[in-house]
Structures are given as structure tokens and as C-alpha cells.
Image (cartoon, rainbow, N blue to C red):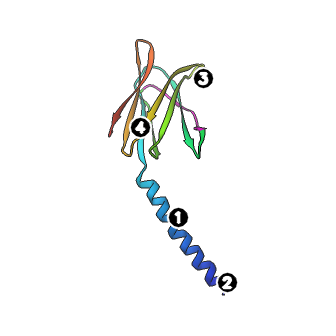
Amino acid sequence: MFGYSRNWLFSGMTVVLAVLGSASVTQAAWITIKNDSHRVVVVQHTVTSQGRLKRCKPVQLLPGESIREFVAPQRMTLDLYDARNTSKLLHSANLSIQQENQAFHISSVEGNMTVSANPGK
């Protein structure tokens, strides 16, 4: 008797989680961050999760390298650090992630690091 109700409860919870999970996946998109500069940089982004700021894992990008991540639409802060001195902040950019694929390019203009967006790439 309890086995039947436990299976029914488990099946019901699975359906609810599948519906809720698919809604968040349909609202997510791929972002690509490419290093178009001639410097080795460390990229770290910060997102808000459940009302708290969360610093994600830093990633080193060589010139010409890129990373792709599947993220939900939100605001994020992208920090660029010097790879030789990771305590030296080169640039900080506030990015607005949309419900579409986006590409962000890291470049150096007159010695200053910049981040520019190319939507849909």
C-alpha cells in the first residue's frame, strides 16, 4: 500500500520538476567570451543567485581563445585580471544577458582593456 503511494508521489514530483526545469532551460542562452586582445587575461564573472552575489570560477584565456557558457537571462559582472598578477583588475564590465545567444569580445584599445557585445553570435 505504501509502495504504491510512494511511486505515485515520486512520479508526480518528477513531472513537476520536469515542467519547472524545462521553463528555465527555454529561457537560457549561450554566451561566448572571446579574447581578441594580445594579452593573456583571467576572466571571472559574478552573478546574483538567490539574492546573493556569487563569484564563478576564474578562467585564463590566451589570445584568440574563447569560452562558452549556458546561462539564464540576468545581469552579470565580468572582471578581467592580468594573468601574471591576478590581483590587478584590468577592467570590469556590467553585462545584461538576454534570452538569445550573445558574444562578447575582449580587446585592448590604446592599452586599456574593453568588453564589447555582438548579439546573436
Q: Determine whether the residue tagged by mark 3 lies in a helix, strand or loop.
A: loop
Answer yes or no: do the residues labelled 4 and 2 have beta carbons within 8 Å? no
Labels 1 and 4: the sequence-earlier one: 1
Q: Looking at the image, which is closer to me, 23 or 103?
A: 23
Labels 2 and 3: the sequence-earlier one: 2
Residue with the mark numbered 1: 17
- Between circles 3 and 1, the one closer to the viewer is 1
Residue 23 in the image, given as x and y percentages of width and height: 44, 58
Residue with the mark numbered 2: 2
Q: Quadrant of the N terminus?
A: bottom right
Q: CA distance from mark 1 to mark 2?
A: 22 Å
Callout 4 amino acid: Thr
Residue with the mark numbered 4: 32
- Residue 119 falls within the magenta-colored stretch: no
53 left or right, relative to 69? right
Labels 4 and 2: the sequence-earlier one: 2
Residue with the mark numbered 3: 86
